[in-house]
Image (spheres, helix red, strand yellow):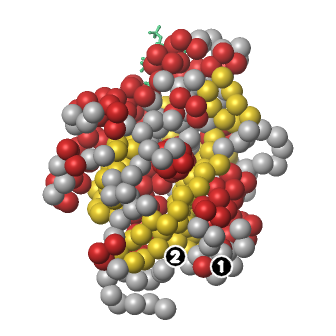
Amino acid sequence: MKSLMMQGTQILSTGSSVPDSSLSNDQISQIVETSDKWIVTRTGIKKRRLLTGSRKSVIDLAVVAALKALDKISMSALEIDLIILATSSPNDLFGSASQVQAQIKAFNAVAFDLTAACSGFVLAMVTASQFLQSGSYRTILVIGADVLSKWTNWSDRSTCILFGDGAGAMILQSCLKEFNQVLGFQLNTNGNHWNHLCLSYEEKINPHPILNVYQGSFKYISMNGKEVYKFAVSQVPLSILKCLHDLNITINDIDWLLLHQANERILTAVANKLSINANKIIVNLNNYGNTSAASIPLALDEALDQKQISNDDIIVISGFGAGLTWGTVIIQWKC
Ligand code: UT7
């Protein structure tokens, strides 16, 4: 039932899932001309997980992450009102969220996909918090999941070393304003530079002979790494500063910096620009690579499992990537 009262957003639980199959840098160096040393030095990545085997998709990872989040708080999936699946590697271009809804038996939930690549989880969290704070829905499952291994050109050494597969989930619920944990956000898009990182639709040369309709298919990820690097290091700190300013929070108040896990050098450079101590950076990309929309909830779930995060900690979360799209959401953790 709709309530007109503005409310807060509580984070109830997180969960994550990665495939079993692991691919080390040494193994990649048997496929393309690269080395463990080059990859570790330039990115910090040591290995990544890949979804192998036939008929496996992003849905399988998303379902496991969601069920783990539900299980942690013994919540029935029937309590979920809305599922937002942030993914750019759906199993169905019409959307994969409905299949997640069916598989976890969240039969009361509306479900839709949100496509924003590596910023997807931040955008999905913000979208969810709007529905909660307006009183439209009570309980929302947000999932960030991607299987970019399916869209990677495994003969392109400049991209294939970066990505890995995974999923992370978060359950959010409306609450009284005084218990609000999603403090604020700041979002941006610059479509002029979409071609720095894209997975574009490619037309066949010839159209349908009668209809003049050009059909085609999606091919591989294409990236200008240097430009994406410069964009991330210059724009992410600005987004964080704007968000902090709006909330009257200082750099010293930040307990954790949780950035999209793209490249360890980007994480360090952003922290340095903001004068945030390196020991406040949450990092797990060494083991998983860049898992796109999954990277933030996967890293958060691991940090929580490892009891890194304490009650009342302020966590600055930023996503950035294709679009180009980037943004920040600041949360306060409650145990
Ligand atoms: O979610 C956002 C996703 N995207 C990103 O986060 C990408 C951001 N960008 C980056 O992380 C970095 O630009 C990369 C890690 C992708 C590349 O690092 P870089 O320091 O910018 O290297 P580069 O592209 O300038 O390449 C330097 C050299 C080149 O050789 P030459 O021209 O100097 O002879 C490349 O051909 O390294 C070569 N190179 C490689 N060598 C060994 C490129 N890829 C590889 C490789 N192994 N895998």
Q: Which residue is mark 2?
A: 139
Asked if one can make out residue 144 in the rendered structure from this viewpoint, the answer is yes
Q: Could you tell whether 135 is left or right of 247 in the image?
A: right
Tell me which label, 2 or 1, sits earlier in the chain: 1
Residue nearest the viewer, comparing 64 with 43: 64
Quarter of the rendering containing residue 176: bottom left
Residue depicted at 34% across the width and 70% down the height: 180
Give the CA separation, mark 2 to mark 1.
10 Å
Residue depicted at 41% across the width and 49% down the height: 309
Q: Could you tell whether 298 is left or right of 274 in the image?
A: right
Q: Could you tell whether 220 is left or right of 266 in the image?
A: right
Residue depicted at 54% across the width and 48% down the height: 305
Residue nearest the viewer, comparing 120 with 245: 245
Q: Could you tell whether 331 is left or right of 15 in the image?
A: left
Q: Residues within 10 Å of mark 2 (few under 14, many from 20)?
A: many
Task: Give the amino acid at mark 2.
Answer: Thr
Q: Residues within 10 Å of mark 1 (few under 14, many from 20)?
A: few
Give percent across and percent down for residue 287.
Answer: 58, 31
Quarter of the rendering containing residue 259: top left
Q: What kind of element bears circle 2?
A: strand
Q: What kind of element bears circle 1?
A: helix
Q: Which residue is mark 1?
A: 78
Quarter of the rendering containing residue 83: bottom right
Residue depicted at 69% across the width and 36% down the height: 50
